[in-house]
Image (tube, coloured by chain):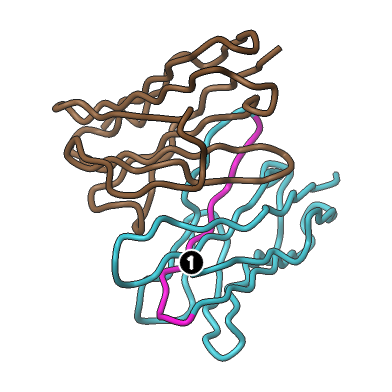
Chain colours: A cyan, B brown
Amino acid sequence: AQSVTQLDSQVPVFEEAPVELRCNYSSSVSVYLFWYVQYPNQGLQLLLKYLSGSTLVESINGFEAEFNKSQTSFHLRKPSVHISDTAEYFCAVSPLRGNTPLVFGKGTRLSVIA
Amino acid sequence: KAGVTQTPRYLIKTRGQQVTLSCSPISGHRSVSWYQQTPGQGLQFLFEYFSETQRNKGNFPGRFSGRQFSNSRSEMNVSTLELGDSALYLCASSTSGASYEQYFGPGTRLTVT
């Protein structure tokens, strides 16, 4: 079975400052990794995903995440945040093989302060 | 393409009643998964349907059930509602299945009084 730990439940950061949201996972098999974002009163939107290949993946709005197999981590980073990035961010994992559903972390609430 | 739609968006029910939630997936997506989101438990998987068959089931009591129709639309039913069933119920669709990239709807906010 897989599990996901998001180490910070809340992260406040000033506008234009860098941010890192941490995600560690546990799995005995190879995995797919995802970051989702949830804005208030909305569903989840896929931010980025790691399936295979390059360990650094990027989103269209400036976020990036790096898959680190040895540390079983998939931290999310952005060099300069905007007010509009205020949201809850969820890390998720699923095994490469089989059809086991995504397992989500508890989420990290990012608050960008003007 | 239109996204995943869920109806209704908000619902208030009384303990003991039953409720049915509806989800229309993205056109061409055959997999529909349901999740329950609460502040305490986070996102918990309920079940997945693929081509009208339940392929995965989470750890929820039998009061929670679902089905999928031939057009891939899905419904979720909760019978004998309890206060603890108050949550945001999210539907997600995918081309391939529950392990893959999921596209989520806006959710149905259920309040049980």
| Secondary structure, magenta segment, majority class | strand
**Local crowd size for mark 1, using a 10 Å CA cut-off: few (<14), some (14–19), many (≥20):** some
User: Tag 1's secondary structure?
Assistant: strand
- Name which residue type carries label 1: Glu
Chain letter for the residue marked with disc 1 in the picture: A
Stretch of the chain drawn in magenta:
A28-40
The picture places residue A95, in percent across and down from the top left corner, at 39, 70
The picture places residue A32, in percent across and down from the top left corner, at 41, 69
Q: Is residue A32 magenta?
A: yes
Q: Residue at x 49, y 34 (%)?
A: B90
Q: Residue at x 83, y 56 (%)?
A: A13
Q: Where is A112 relative to A25, above or below?
A: above
Question: Can you identify the residue that label 1 sits on?
Answer: A58
Q: Looking at the rendering, in which quadrant would you find the N terminus of chain B?
A: top left
Task: Work out whether residue A18 or residue B105 is closer to the camera in this orientation and state it.
Answer: B105
Q: Where is A33 relative to A56, above or below?
A: above
The picture places residue B106, in percent across and down from the top left corner, at 49, 29
The picture places residue B35, in percent across and down from the top left corner, at 49, 39
Q: Where is A97 relative to A108, above or below?
A: below
Which residue is situated farthest in the bottom direction here? A70
Q: As drawn, is B28 to the left or to the right of B31?
A: left
Q: Is residue A47 magenta?
A: no
Task: Work out whether residue A37 or residue A61 is closer to the camera in this orientation and state it.
Answer: A37
Task: Work out whether residue A10 or residue A58 is closer to the camera in this orientation and state it.
Answer: A10
